[in-house]
Amino acid sequence: MSTLTKNEHGRIARIAAINIGVALTVVTLKYIAYAVSGSVALFSDALESIVNVMTAIAAFSAIRLSAKPADADHPFGHYKAEFLAAMFEGAMIAVAAVLIMIKAYSGLVNGVELAHPGLGLIINIVSTVINAGWAWALIKWGTNWRSPALVADGQHLFTDVITSVGVVAALIVAILTGWTILDPLIAAAVATHILFMGYNIATDSMSRLMDQAASPEIEGRIRGVIEANGHGALEAHDIRTRQAGRALFIEFHLVVPGTMTVDDAHVICDRLEDSIEQSIEGSEVVIHVEPEHKAKPEESGAVPL
């Protein structure tokens, strides 16, 4: 199986640890921005960033756990721990959205008095630039290293960036027009947006925890590799896939002539396993060999060889 090396696992864990420090830095800057301005929207932005700290810690813990090798109790490894972290992030985003809504409602009812909004804007913009750059890096690294937790954390940070952009826009308009009611209104609108993003992250992680199949593009590549490297066999059928963190488990039935020896069938299986694992990074292949009377019609999805 083409899996991550120990060094690669360590690199992902180090990035996740740095992520905690970045989250703490950003939330501190955003709280200072709120403290000097008195803005409800900036308070909401800081509150959403507190969730970043919690989810960064959860992602770090999940990545450390998912790196553990398979054992007697978990023969397929611990890869799905990262999906649990991604689900937790989705839930925390939803909680933050609700808390922002509560604060926005309070601002609408009681009014908002801005103290030093200009200084608050500058501090918030600095934190937003940090978040945007770090979110982009997390998604890039998470995609390259097949880490759902890093990708989910990067997507979460982008919701924070969207929040901050909305907050900055609201404060600028509020300062220029004197319409301070825009401050809580924009906070409520942004809360609604990130609520949907949190829902999407959670539902996607739930689907993967329930052994979601590989994408049609990946399944097409698998069938192509089988067709190109299955000579000597008669057909392959019942091709199934399931994604578990960075690992993609692939299994199928390989029909061979009834007179073929076990050694010859084993040679074909080894060739197919090596070819698939080289073509599909992170894959683990299991092949069940069957005699020719077990063949299925091509209409059933069988791959003739």
Image (spheres, rainbow, N blue to C red):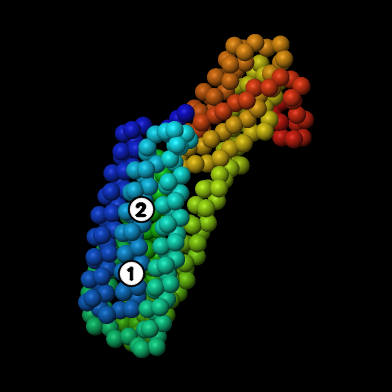
The amino acid type of the residue labelled 2 equals: Ala
Packing grade of label 1 (10 A; few <14, some 14-19, many >=20) is some
The residue sitting at 50% across, 52% down in the picture is: 205
Q: At numbered mark 1, what does the secondary structure look like: helix, strand or loop?
A: helix
- Where residue 190 sits, quadrant-wise, is bottom left
The residue sitting at 32% across, 85% down in the picture is: 112
- Where residue 229 sits, quadrant-wise, is top right
Residue 19's x, y, as percent?
Answer: 30, 52
The amino acid type of the residue labelled 1 equals: Leu
The correct choice, above or below, for 77 with respect to 177 in the image is above
The residue sitting at 62% across, 13% down in the picture is: 262
Residue 215's x, y, as percent?
Answer: 58, 43
The correct choice, above or below, for 298 with respect to 65 in the image is above
Q: Is residue 176 visible?
A: no
Query: What residue is disc 2 on?
Result: 58
Nearer to us in this view, 222 or 247:
247
Residue 47: which numbered mark, if any? 1
On the rendered structure, is 259 left or right of 209? right
Nearest to N terminus: mark 1 or mark 2: 1
Nearer to us in this view, 179 or 238:
238
Q: In 3D space, how far apart are the residues under numbered discs 1 and 2 (Cα atoms)?
A: 18 Å
Extreme bottom residue here? 110
Residue 175's x, y, as percent?
Answer: 31, 82
The correct choice, above or below, for 24 with respect to 189 in the image is above
The residue sitting at 30% across, 46% down in the picture is: 15
On the rendered structure, is 159 left or right of 34? right
Quadrant for the C terminus in the image? top right
Q: At numbered mark 2, what does the secondary structure look like: helix, strand or loop?
A: helix
